[in-house]
Amino acid sequence: MKKTLGTIVFSFLILLAVISCSSHEKSFIKSGGSDVVSFRVLPFELTDIKLLDGPFLLATELNINTLLKYEPDRLLSKFYSEAGL
């Protein structure tokens, strides 16, 4: 009985999540002409992003410093062996 009730509750929650995630409303950009462009997100260049002080900047700097400390031959050794070099 508990297993059946749990399955029903779980199925209901999945159904609720799917319904809430699927939006029938679409966003539009009007370009001044007769065309209308549907979009979910607008593209942007990575150079448009600047990380301010915080955990993401710290993590990025830590990743960069860690990768720069590796010796290139040791870092690429698995690729070399797979390529037969």
Image (cartoon, rainbow, N blue to C red):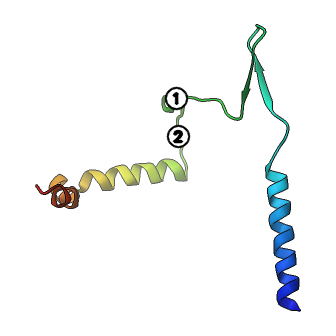
Q: Secondary structure at mark 1?
A: loop
Q: Position of residue 14 (x, y in %)?
A: 80, 65
| Image quadrant assignment for residue 30 | top right
User: Nearer the N terminus, badge 2 or badge 1?
Assistant: 1
Question: Which residue position holds label 2?
Answer: 51
- Residue 77 in the image: state x and y as whole percent: 18, 60
**Residue type (three-letter) at the residue carrying disc 1:** Glu
**58 and 16: which one is in front?**
16
Q: Nearer the viewer, residue 28 or 66?
A: 28
> Which residue matches tag 1?
45
> Most extreme residue toward the bottom, as rendered?
1
Figure disc tally: 2
User: From what the image shows, is residue 37 above or below residue 26?
Assistant: above
Q: Position of residue 22 (x, y in %)?
A: 80, 48
Residue drawn 27% across and 50% down?
A: 68
Q: Quarter of the image holding residue 41? A: top right
Above-or-below relation of 33 to 18: above
Q: CA distance from mark 2 to mark 1?
A: 14 Å
